[in-house]
Image (tube, rainbow, N blue to C red):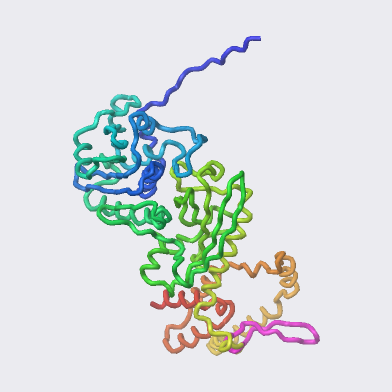
Amino acid sequence: MVISEPAGEVLDPCAEDLIQSLRAFGYDLPTALADLIDNSIAAGATTVRIAHCSDPGVAWVGVLDDGRGMSEDELRDAMRFARDPNAARTANDLGRFGLGLKTASLSHVRRVTVLTRKHHGTLSARTWDIDHVSEQRQWRVITELDEGAAAIAEQLGFTGQGTLVLWRKTDRLGDRPGLSRRINEAGRELSLLFHRFVERGRLTLYLGGRVLSPMDPYLRRHPATQDRGFEDLEHGGHRIRLNPVVLPHPSRLSRSEMALASGPGGMQDRQGFYVYRGDRLVVAGGWLGLPGLHKSQPTRLARVAVDIPPEADLVWEVDVRKSTVRPPSMLERRMAEIARDVRARSERVFAYRGAPTARARTERDIHPVWHQVRRRGVSEYVVNREHPLVAAVLAGPNGEALEGVLHMVETTLPVETISQEILSSAQPNGSTAKDSADVEEVLATFRAMLAGLPKDPETRSVLLEALTKAEPFATYPGLIQEVIESEEN
């Protein structure tokens, strides 16, 4: 039996359209530059220099390394779009899809030139130019080195072995001071993404004329940092290492330490998992979409380093930009357990910051809102009329009406229903749902009550002190004090 081929036709993508679409991969500038540095590391570079010129009309950005360089054939392959993501790679090869150099570059500029030279070899060059591809309507790479690129290479002192990636036609980066500002801001993020390489002396990063210092996101040298040790997980023949860390309370950090621990959104934005791929940080914060985990103020000191090998890319769904990952479903439960533990430890740092010592703290320091009383062998619960806040309102013009409302609440309090709910919601370890109540709700309630306090300074001070000693606010003295300082100043 002869099986005929199905009818078909070749539909090659339009070069001029597709190269424009490839600009929409979503690279920000630090991620794009990091992709180029990945290539330098894979080429054995120990020094990478980032330079730029912001002059209008002739602006450019260059990334120069001292790696092995490439031959003509190697450069031709490097400039080709895409490669087999399943192909075997060396341990220090941080690439995967064969798109990074091109898409990272063209996301920001319209012309990218790569100049490269092996030891004692000749200079090779290739240029992708969006306008040239559109005019030719072909995937036509320019093989001739133009005078402008040659002049910049000479200006940068590129005379030996290595590779220079040169960005020109900076339509999306702009020029003038705006370009310089963006490059400098990107340098801060690169200090974080490659902090392990820099810390361990494997890489020296230059931004202009200055050496970038590593940004340790865990402040390991600080005596109050809580390093919770390592835990290894196995999945798909790969070892995944997790290291939960709790940062010190912000009040114990210097300005420079706060800067190290913060990102564009502050410490709260930087909490969460820090995923490393071959020692290169690819995700700096966030809870990876794990159920029940979200960024909050009390958990902003919680960080978990996660090391995955480069060959686990596909299982962890590392994207082309190497900026997002998704953990395998088999590991999610244990990762969530570790995350919840380190988040709880972060909350405790705030809960006990500024709290009285065990010797000084007594039951008199806390003003309970409810009192338990026994009548005819049955427990009943009544609102504490001596609580300063309750007493202040009862002494006011509407005190008599409030007394009636309080009595109604007390007599209708569903004690049995509450007891059954507590028992049914008990966790295997003996804790209850209330133990994991969202601290943010407590803080929101406190802010609302703070806004309703009288403006008279003396009365406000008395009631504010009483409020901080009332439950549930007394449980979180550090966080409550932060709210007071932010709202009162």
Left or right of residue 132, residue 320 in this image: right
- Residue 23 visible here: no
Task: Give how far across and how far down residue 235 sits, in percent.
Answer: 61, 47
The quadrant holding residue 290 is bottom right
Residue 369 part of the magenta-drawn span: yes
Q: Quadrant of residue 316?
A: top right
Furthest residue in direction right, as rendered: 376
- Residue 314 versus residue 74 in the image, above or below: below
Q: Nearer the viewer, residue 78 or 380?
A: 78
Residue 332 visible somewhere in the drawing: yes
**Residue 375 image offset from top left, x and y in percent:** 77, 87
Q: Nearer the viewer, residue 276 or 13?
A: 276
Relative to 462, 162 lies left or right:
left
Q: Which residue is painted at 27% across and 45% down in the image?
A: 61
In the depicted view, which residue is nearer to us: 387 or 197?
Answer: 197
Q: Which residues are magenta?
A: 363-384
Q: In the image shown, does 185 or 7 lie closer to the viewer?
A: 185
The image quadrant where one finds the N terminus is top right
On whether residue 104 falls in the magenta region, the answer is no
Query: Which residue, as the protein is rendered here, is positioned at the far top?
Result: 1
Position of residue 307 measured from the top left corner of the image (x, y, whole percent): 52, 52
Task: Identify the residue at image location x=61%, y=83%.
Answer: 368
Residue 475 on image: x %, y %: 57, 77
**What quarter of the picture does the C terminus occupy?**
bottom left
Q: Relative to residue 346, is residue 65 depicted above or below? A: above
How many labels were placed on the picture?
A: 0
Residue at 48%, 88% in the rendered image? 462
Q: Is residue 347 above or below residue 209?
A: below
